[in-house]
Image (spheres, helix red, strand yellow):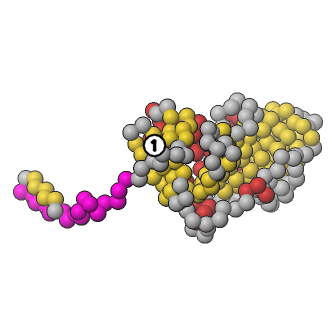
Amino acid sequence: TLQVECQGQKANVKGIEAEEFPAAAEFGTEGVFELPADIFCRMIKRASIAAGDGKIRPVLAGILVELVKGQLSLVAADGFRLSICNTEVSEEREAIVIVPARSLMELTKIGLDIDLIQVDVHENRVLFQAGDTKLVCQVINGEFPDYRKMYSSGYTTRAVVNTDDFKRACTMTKVFAKEVADVATVEVSSALRQLTISALSPERGDSAAEIEAEVEGEDITIGLNAIYLLDVLRVIESEQVVMEATSPLSAVTIKPLDGSDFSYIVMPMMIS
């Protein structure tokens, strides 16, 4: 019992025996690998934007941690979008677990001033160490969706735009898209060499933003969630971003122009 007294006040707080507190998990002697903290934290932030709330399917509230043949992948999906991040690691063993996205986001706060993060993957838990801090994450049991079925490397339309310009355009568009299920109309024109994003609200009015673009392939008009677009643009640091599409009814891929370690796939929406 813990007794607390202060200026005429007194409280007795009941506790439990220290021996009953769960023992801290320890790293194994094999299979521990290290990653630069900035790279791993960036992967977590990028993957977590596509994680769901898990109310219907608990596995969608997690991030798939996939270690295969020296490549570490973090994957998240909520049924409407998919985020895939990859990096090479010095570990040849294989492991596939689902870790709660909220737990991994805590690691991004711990690893701000740390150079390296150690990772030890087990069947039912994953251990992380950042400096003097250890984080133990219990895995989520279940089968993660086969994300490779959603991912396609082909396209019929490709547009390269300035990331900041696209972000500013989406920020304005989401205000007018809010009352129409956040649906924004994205048009890519090869003749005009531009990408236009617009929204129409019966109550608020309408908006349209034209962005200079390097366009390859066919013209396309597609409905996309303005908030989902903003989410990905906020975690892309490169100066230019690529948008690839095959049809108004197929998923759209968004990724940095200067890297192949991150892809974001978002499903289209019906334009009224």
Is residue 195 within the magenta segment?
Answer: no
The residue closer to the viewer here, 66 or 91, is: 91
Q: Which residue is drawn at 70% across and 55% down?
A: 81
Determine whether 1 is above or below 264 in the image: below
For the residue marked with disc 1, what is the amino acid?
A: Gln
Per the rendered image, the range of residues in magenta is 8-24
Q: In which quarter of the image is residue 15?
A: bottom left
Q: Which percent across, then down, holds residue 123?
A: 55, 59
Q: Specify the quadrant that holds the N terminus.
A: bottom left
Q: Residue at x 75, y 44 (%)?
A: 254
Is residue 93 at least partly visible in the picture? yes
Q: In which quarter of the image is residue 71?
A: top right
Q: Which percent across, then down, holds residue 18?
A: 25, 59
Is residue 268 at least partly visible in the picture? no
Q: Name the residue under label 1.
A: 129
The outermost residue toward the bottom is 56
Is residue 11 within the magenta segment?
Answer: yes
Q: In which quarter of the image is residue 191?
A: top right
Q: Which residue is drawn at 23% across and 63% down?
A: 17
* Apparent side of residue 42 relative to residue 204 in the rendered image (left or right): left
Q: Which percent across, then down, holds residue 140?
A: 55, 62
Q: Which percent across, then down, holds residue 16?
A: 24, 64
The outermost residue toward the left is 8
Determine whether 32 is above or below 6 in the image: above
Q: Specify the quadrant that holds the C terminus.
A: bottom right
The residue closer to the viewer here, 165 or 119, is: 119
Q: Estimate how packed mark 1 is, as few (under 14), some (14 to 19) or many (20 or more) residues with alpha carbons within 10 Å.
A: many
Q: Which residue is drawn at 88% across and 43% down?
A: 157
